[in-house]
């Protein structure tokens, strides 16, 4: 069984930064896909960014240039560096990992990010 555990959320002022981490534990030889999604109150969960094992990344237009995703494949860990945070970035951020492109999906429990002065 694989578990994803996020950390690093919290309250930050507009323009500030946070770094989220997601560590996978359990029986796994690695992940093809690791990414971050977010869900704000009353809204659908949306993609923030992902990175596949080749290093290819993809970002939502709303965070491009402000957020950076990275991975430590040896530790099955994915990070999300969030800079120049805006109130609109406030949400629960979820880690998502896939062992293969279409199978072996896992989700973390979420970490809350609040952006407010």
Image (cartoon, grey):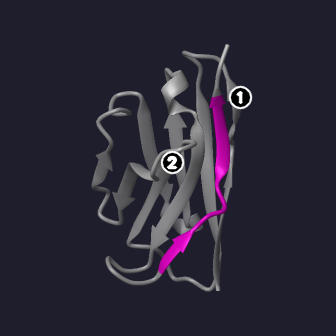
The secondary structure that most of the magenta stretch takes on is: strand
Front in this rendered view, residue 44 or 14: 44
Point out residue 24 in the picture as x, y percentages from the top left corner: 62, 69
Front in this rendered view, residue 86 or 19: 86
Task: Using the rendered view, name the quadrant where residue 23 is placed.
Answer: bottom right
**Residue under pointer 2:** 38
Q: Residue at x 57, y 33 (%)?
A: 90
Region of the chain picked out in magenta, as a range: 105-114
Task: Using the rendered view, name the quadrant where residue 65 is placed.
Answer: top left
Q: Looking at the image, how many numbered discs can be counted on the residues?
A: 2
Q: Quadrant of the N terminus?
A: bottom right
Left or right relative to 42: residue 67 = left
**With respect to residue 39, does 74 lie above or below?**
below
Q: Residue at x 32, y 76 (%)?
A: 101
Q: Is residue 75 magenta?
A: no
Residue 11 circle label: 1
């Amino acid at each position: 069984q694989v578990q994803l555990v996020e950390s690093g959320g919290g309250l930050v002022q507009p323009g500030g930064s946070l770094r989220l981490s997601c560590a996978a534990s359990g029986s796994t030889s690695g992940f093809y896909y690791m990414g971050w999604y977010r869900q704000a109150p009353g809204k659908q969960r949306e993609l923030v960014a992902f990175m596949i094992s080749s290093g290819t990344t993809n970002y939502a237009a709303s965070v491009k240039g402000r957020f950076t995703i990275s991975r430590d494949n040896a530790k099955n860990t994915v990070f999300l560096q969030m800079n120049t945070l805006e109130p609109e970035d406030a949400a629960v951020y979820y880690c998502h990992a896939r062992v293969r492109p279409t199978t072996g999906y896992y989700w973390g429990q979420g970490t809350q990010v609040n952006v407010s002065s």
